[in-house]
Image (cartoon, rainbow, N blue to C red):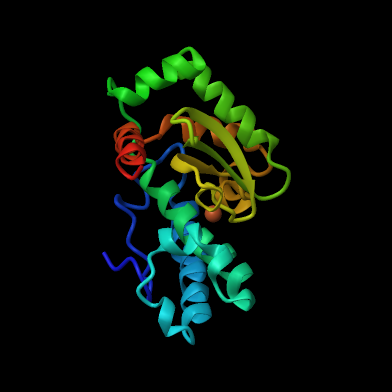
Amino acid sequence: MNDHYPFVNTPLPYPYDALEPYIDQKTMKLHHDRHLQTYVDQLNAVLKDYPQLHQWTLHQLLTNIDYLPAEIQIPVRNNAGGVYSHRLYFCGMKKASIRSMNGNLERAMDYAYGGIHKFQEAMKEAGLSVFGSGYAWLVVNRSGQLTIMTTPNQDTPLSVGLCPIMNVDVWEHAYYLKNYNKRAEYIDHWLSVINWEEAEKNYQRCFEEE
Ligand SMILES: [Fe+2]
């Protein structure tokens, strides 16, 4: 996968209707093909005249925002953030199935939250607490512990040195067609389609990078 300029909109790792009946096909198609595509296009447009950044990965761009030319810091934050956050979100879901997780992440969740169900409640509460548009995230903090946090707009935890494991997009475009203004209903549906294997892999990766 080309993880530097020019960025491309990688296809969903499953069909548009794979998350039905929890997340509908029309929302998935619009969300991936229009909303995410726009962030990809805008990021490429921002970087076009900065060849010194053409080999930088999304991760590098987002962890070094303060070192970028001042005039592109905000558009990179918004658009590289939009690409990164959406990729994590889309890859973090899969067709609803029996949860098969018995690895280190599950043990860490037991320790931090007292079990998966308590974690799910906390994640839902965080998603509901976002005022306006943004995300709720599960991250590994600098001490190696699990933490739930929220970010506004397309800001990512990478920019403050944290390692993301999963996120839920609570922008209205993620759910308005199906759930209208009922964000709680949408988050419940998202909780049903979490890709736990992907979350476990992301969790392991947080410790490999350190
Ligand atoms: Fe989104």
Is 200 left or right of 72, judged from the image as shown? left
Q: Number of labelled discs? A: 0
In what quadrant does ligand 1 lie?
A: bottom right
> Which image quadrant: the N terminus?
bottom left
Front in this rendered view, residue 97 or 6: 6
Snapshot quadrant of residue 33: bottom left
Front in this rendered view, residue 115 or 156: 156
Is 124 left or right of 14, judged from the image as shown? right
Q: Could one spot residue 99 in this view of the protein?
A: no
Counting from the top left corner in percent of width and height, residue 81 is at 52, 59
Residue 42 vertical position relative to residue 131 in the rendered view, above or below = below
Q: Residue at x 49, y 66 (%)?
A: 34
Residue 204 vertical position relative to residue 42 in the rendered view, above or below = above
Residue 148 vertical position relative to residue 55 in the rendered view, above or below = above
> Which image quadrant: the C terminus?
top left
Counting from the top left corner in percent of width and height, residue 166 is at 44, 39
Front in this rendered view, residue 6 or 168: 6
Counting from the top left corner in percent of width and height, residue 109 is at 43, 20
Counting from the top left corner in percent of width and height, residue 126 is at 62, 32
Q: Could one spot residue 180 in this view of the protein?
A: yes
Residue that protrudes farthest toward the right in the picture: 131
Residue that protrudes farthest toward the bottom in the picture: 49
Q: Residue at x 29, y 34 (%)?
A: 197
Q: Residue at x 57, y 46 (%)?
A: 175
Is 148 left or right of 29, judged from the image as shown? right
Residue 162 vertical position relative to residue 194 in the rendered view, above or below = below
